[in-house]
Amino acid sequence: MPSINQLLYKQSRQKKFKKNKTPALAKKPQVKGICVKVFTRSPKKPNSAIRKVAKVKLSTKKVVECYIPGIGHNLRQFSSVLVRGGRVPDLPGVKYKCIRGKYDFICVPGRKTARSKYGTRRK
């Protein structure tokens, strides 16, 4: 027979909800935004590189840092981008990614594999 404390503990465990990992998107799959600043950042300890990152003001009035995927980009201040969720594990605080091939963000030219991620058309 469980004690009262055990019953209360079980109820509190069952009531916990899943934490929202992309709160700035306001429960939408993608959100449009305007680039405020485009810059580079170095990753966490075991990795070394120069990752491209953009600070974006979303249409939900929140400012977030978004990762710029792929090789090369044409983003600069005031460029329009479409933002989706998806964190970059070796960049702390970067929980969003820009979608290539939409608005001002061009596709990766000459891409042969994984084209859908980089907005490249089939030739």
Image: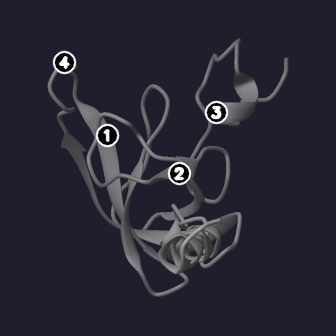
Residue that carries the numbered disc 4 in the rendered image: 46
Residue that carries the numbered disc 2 in the rendered image: 98
Q: Amino acid at mark 3?
A: Tyr
Q: Residues within 10 Å of mark 3 (few under 14, many from 20)?
A: many
Q: Residues within 10 Å of mark 2 (few under 14, many from 20)?
A: many
Label 2: state its secondary structure. strand
| Nearest to the observer: residue 113 or residue 11 | 11
Of mark 4 and mark 1, the one earlier in the sequence is 4
Q: Residues within 10 Å of mark 1 (few under 14, many from 20)?
A: some
Q: Quadrant of residue 10?
A: bottom right
Query: Residue at image x 71%, y 63%?
Result: 29
x and y, in percent, of residue 30 in the image: 67, 64
Quarter of the image where the N terminus is located: bottom right
Q: Is residue 102 left or right of residue 5?
A: right
Q: Is residue 101 left or right of residue 122?
A: left
Of mark 4 and mark 2, the one earlier in the sequence is 4
Query: Residue at image x 17%, y 34%?
Result: 42
Vertically, is 74 above or below 49? Answer: below
Label 4: state its secondary structure. loop
Q: Amino acid at mark 1?
A: Lys
Q: Quadrant of residue 85?
A: bottom right
Spatial separation of the CA atoms under disc 4 and disc 2: 25 Å
